[in-house]
Structures are given as C-alpha cells and as structure tokens.
Image: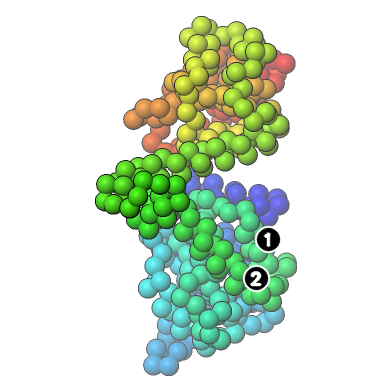
Amino acid sequence: MEFAERLTALAAKVRQQRSQIDTEEATKNAFVMPFISTILGYDVFNPLEVVPEFTADVGVKKGEKIDYAIMHGGTVQILIECKKSKEPLKIEHASQLYRYFAVTNARIAILTNGEIYEFFTDLDAPNRMDAKPFLVLDLNDIDETLIPELMKLTKEIFDLDSIINAAGELKYIGQIKRTLASQFKEPDAEWIKFLTMRVYDGGSYTQKVREQFSGLVTKATKQFLNEQVNDRLKTALGAPNFPLASEPAVAANITSEQVVEDDLNETAVETTLEELEGYQIVRAIVCNEVKAARVAQRDAKSYFAVLLDDNNRKPIARLHFNRVQKYLGVFDGQKVEQRIPISSLDEIYEHADALRSSVRAYLAAG
C-alpha cells in the first residue's frame, strides 16, 4: 500500500474501534503501535528501532519513563508520549517530553492520544521543546498537505534536517489554518467586527450592529465553505459549475417515479457542507468497485442523492439530513430503499458492504 493509503486505513481503524478503547494501554496497542509500524515503518518488536518504556534519569527525577523512543542511526531521534484515546491533548500532558527532550539526542517529540498526533521540536530555543507543535496530524480529518512532511520521519526516508528546516513555516501555517477553521465554525467578537467593518456603511459599530452581524457572519462563512467544497467536487468530476438540475438534457433523462422527479426539479435547494462530506465518504467507499469520476451527486428538496453515472435509475445512497434525525438510505437488489438512522457521518462506514453491493449490481446489469 502507498503511504497515503496506509494512513487512510489507520484512520478507518481508529473510527471503527475508538468506542471500545478505554485505557491508555489499549490506545497504545490498538492505535499508536500500528502508527509507529505501518506509518513510520519502524519494527515495534526490535529494541534497536523502538524502545518501549524508555528510561533516562533527569536531574532529581529518577526512573521516569517515556512511552516510546524511536532509534535511528543508533541514537534516539523521536520520543512519543501517549494518552488515552478520546482524552483531549493538553500541553500539561507533555511534562515528561519536555524533560526527556533536553537530555537525549531527540529533535522530534510526539504527544498523542492515538487519534491526534502533535509533533514538537526546538525552534524557539536549542534543546528545549517548544510549547506549540509544528505539525498536527488528526486522523479524523487528515490534512493531505502534511503527508510529504510526515514521510520525512519514516524509517525509509528519515530526512530530519529537511523537516526541521520546514518546521517553522509548518508551525505557523498550521496555527493560522486552525484559527481560521475555529472562526468559520464559531466566530468570535473580534472576527465578527473585523468582517463587519469592511462591509457595513451604516455608521458606528454598536451593540445592535454586532448582534445583527453575528448571525450574518456565521451564515456567510458556512455558505462560503459550502460553495468552495461544491466547486471543487464539480471540478473534480468534470461537471459544469452551475446546478445540473437546470440542464434540459439532464431533466429529460429523469424517468423515475414522479415524486422523485419533482423533488430533483425543486429549485429552492440548499446543499449543506454535511451533505457534501457524506457524499465524499460514500464516494470513497465505493471507489473499490468503480472509478471516482462515475460517482455523481444531486441535491433534492428532501434528500441528497449519490448516483452511479449521474443516472437516477442507479441510486447508490440517499442522505436524508434535512431533519433532526438523520438517515442513510441504502438500496437492495430491487432498488428498494432502506433508511438507516445515523447520529454521525462516521456511521456511514458501517454500511460499506451495502453501498458497494449496489454498485456491483449496477455494473453486473450493464
């Protein structure tokens, strides 16, 4: 498997098993050791490569242990401290990493809960671990731009100088991206004022104006993200950058039951980011059976459709997300829809077999 595929496979394992992982030891065995082995490429059972419970006396602190030390070239190069899965990572968890970083040759320290991996080095002061990570890998939301940098820490490549040289830029770019993400999700007062004062021409920025624009900024940022994601998906699929439902040729091809036809012809449809994320998950699942370019999407008034070959007669899934209780619609051999209640997008992966089975049936029927 390619590096990115191994990373995706580990992320899927984390999603599937995280609910059963309740201790730090289970986190190490189920998530962290596979990360060291399959992602970084080190033999976790070879003490010349990976030393568990690594001990290095630090001042008056005797017998303290770090969870893993990764060796390369006969010296310690990477230190890893683990916390329990589902437990948020805090800088307070890194106290042992701070101490060990100063007394070993390690230039990279990793703090992880098996789902999120925070990578630290010594940009601010030599041999002193920084307070903020230069790279954050979240297996629940993998940033593909980080993959080339992560590969530099693998056993096969291990280009420490290159990643240290890039760490400064990575650190600040990562922090800026995370700040933007948090503002898009829940804008704070400064962000609301910053945007309001660039568009509002009604005078002073009063409390009434702030309250008015708080909702507008939140709505505008969500719509902006929706449009950006939708544009990228349409570009990737080679589709025109306007609503497909308005095309006469496409409308003429819709020959399913009238209620579906009316639904797809509905003009007052707002595609949500959650629907697009669900579509991406379904598309990724069925790519085992068919090329991604053949998996299309159409939004409707009451559901979001995922179709093979953009053909309404070949539904792969329907996402019923326009309600309090969300449902995933899957289809049997007679194209009868079964609606399955779901509470999160991750649950779509639990029905991968049914989604792939639908695609295989359409392919077999020609």
Looking at marks 1 and 2 on the same chain, the residue that comes earlier in the sequence is marked by 1
- Amino acid carrying label 2: it is Ala
The answer to whether any part of residue 55 appears in the image is no
229 displayed left or right of 187: right
* Relative depth, front residue between 232 and 163: 232
Q: Residues within 10 Å of mark 1 (few under 14, many from 20)?
A: few
Q: Label 1, on which residue? A: 148
Placement of the C terminus among the 4 image quadrants: top right
Residue 24 vs 221, above or below: the answer is below
Q: Helix, strand, or loop for circle 2?
A: helix
Residue that badge 2 annotates? 166
> What residue is rendered at 46% in x and 59% in y?
179
Instruction: Tell me whether circle 1 and circle 2 mark residues in contact (CB < 8 Å).
Output: no
Q: How many marks?
A: 2
Q: Which residue is at 64% across, 21% downward?
A: 310
For the residues marked 1 and 2, what is the alpha-carbon distance in whole angstroms? 11 Å
Q: Where is residue 27 shown, x and y percent of the image?
A: 45, 59
Residue 154: quarter of image: bottom right
User: In the image, residue 277 lies at what x, y percent?
Assistant: 52, 38
Residue 287 percent location from the top left of the image: 66, 35
Mark 2 packing: few (<14 Cα in 10 Å), some, or many (20+)? few
